[in-house]
Amino acid sequence: MKFYSTNNKDLRVSFKEAVFNSMPLDKGLYMPEVIPQLPTDFIDHIEKYSLTEIAYEVASALLKDEIRAEDLKALVAEAANFNAPAVALDDHTFVLELFHGPSLAFKDFGARFMSRVMGYFLKDGEQLLDVLVATSGDTGGAVALGFLGVPNTRVTILYPKGKVSPIQEQQLTTLGQNIRAIEIDGTFDDCQALVKAAFADEELNKKFRLTSANSINISRLIPQTFYYFNAYAQLKRKGIKDVVFSVPSGNFGNIGAGLLAYKMGLPVKQFIAATNVNDTVPRFLETGVYETKPSVQTYANAMDVGAPSNWVRIMDLFGGDTETLKKVVTAYRYNDEETLAGIKTIDEKYNYITCPHTAIAYLAADKYRNETDFEGGIVFLSTAHSCKFPDIFPAELAAKIEIPTSVKELEGRTKQADELGVDFEGFKKWLESKN
Ligand SMILES: *Cc1c(COP(=O)(O)O)cnc(C)c1O
């Protein structure tokens, strides 16, 4: 399987090249040249497979020419080594808990898979790999924990100063070893712009072997398809065949992976893109005009994205056909007040506490149920553990949140981070001086 650039379909590269380049020079994004169809026999009996078996089947359809079967099996088993249960809140509403990995967020699926793919391709004696990552909070922790101690790699994390939670900041800044953190005096979009500028900079590319760990890297996207198939399998075991997914969306990598799974043959009735007030995509689906805006800070800060980078991939999956896309994807937006009310509703109704991102997905799922006569199963994705966002919960709800032991272990560790502005020259100098 080769991968093309969304800006130039004649440009074809190997998976290895797509993973290490992260982004083609023409600033498109890599996509598989063919969307492989999973065997109907596999889909028809998917309820018989475990998460790692499903992961192998899906990964193999895309990557079997590039990674030997036995290696790929071991790789997916290591990457997806935690559960992703679809917990029933009632007979037809399920919360897909994607926060059982090391950083307590769904991004562990992508980050763990990516770090192991890179480790696989990085032979001894190759130039040190510099992973640059912009984060609004959760990516950085997942990537840092994913790459921690991986030989021949170094990770540099850029995060917006004062805009990530204390636990997120601890996960970004206290690990040491091959992990470095920079707090940027700006927004997530500023961090992302700096990383993108570094990839486009010839001098830096000569000096360093740069790669991205953001959701633009194709090796992050692929493993995120696994849990959609696996969630479908779980519902099927309960006798539910009609499934809708509600996905809290920022950069649209998560839902993009869901749509890739759909195009590979996963029978999903509808996807719901749930956003906060950074609503570029909901506005686009309403008006047909795609207009990006600077991001606004919200309670669901991992979704504070004004220019969702994976949107081009979704358009590519649909061959630019907005009308067909609109039949498959519905979008709703929620402000902070509604998000907080949503958290309270879920607690009152189900005695279940969600993070703000997850609450937005719940609200959208609930709205979809009320607006349609859909009677099948609705799965809303829980993208992070609620303990990562302690500040937004009223005291009586905060008291109910159970803190996992992995978080307790970070307490009291020393923060190590440099502070920089939003100008590219400053960031470039930093990279050069810290070599
Ligand atoms: C990253 C993130 C999202 C948004 O996912 P995208 O793939 O960027 O759309 C939602 N919730 C949480 C908790 C996240 O960390």
Image (cartoon, rainbow, N blue to C red):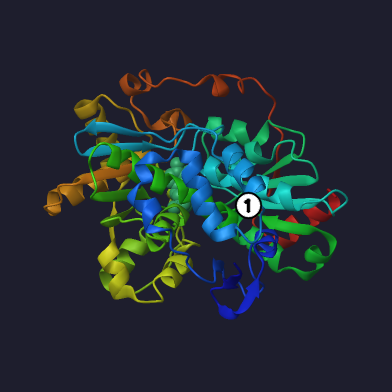
Measured along the vertical axis of the image, is residue 2 above or below residue 360? below
Does residue 89 appear to the left or right of 112 in the view shown? left
Task: Decide if residue 100 is in sight here.
Answer: yes
Q: Tell me what residue is drawn at x 70 percent, y 26 percent.
A: 414
Q: Does the residue tagged 1 have its C-beta within 8 Å of any atom of ligand 1?
A: no
Given residues 186 and 83, the one toward you in this image is: 83
Q: Position of residue 243 (x, y in %)?
A: 26, 49
Measured along the vertical axis of the image, is residue 176 above or below residue 219? above
Callout 1 crowding tier (Cα within 10 Å): few <14, some 14–19, many ≥20: many
Does residue 146 appear to the left or right of 39 in the view shown? right
Residue farthest to the left, as pictured: 373
Given residues 124 and 276, the one toward you in this image is: 124
Q: Position of residue 32 (x, y in %)?
A: 54, 67
Q: Tell me what residue is drawn at x 49 percent, y 53 percent.
A: 58
Q: Tell me what residue is drawn at x 20 percent, y 39 percent.
A: 92
Does residue 108 appear to the left or right of 267 in the view shown? right
Residue farthest to the front, as pictured: 41
Q: Tell me the residue that label 1 is attached to.
A: 213
Measured along the vertical axis of the image, is residue 99 above or below residue 317? above
The amino acid at mark 1 is: Ala
> Which quarter of the picture shows residue 321?
bottom left
Does residue 167 appear to the left or right of 267 in the view shown? right
Figure disc tally: 1
Q: Position of residue 4 (x, y in %)?
A: 58, 73
Q: Position of residue 406 (x, y in %)?
A: 57, 23
Measured along the vertical axis of the image, is residue 69 above or below residue 310? above
Q: Secondary structure at mark 1?
A: loop
Given residues 416 and 372, the one toward you in this image is: 372
Task: Decide if residue 301 is in sight here.
Answer: no
Q: Quadrant of the N terminus?
A: bottom right
Q: Tell me what residue is drawn at x 66 percent, y 55 percent.
A: 67
Residue farthest to the right, as pictured: 125
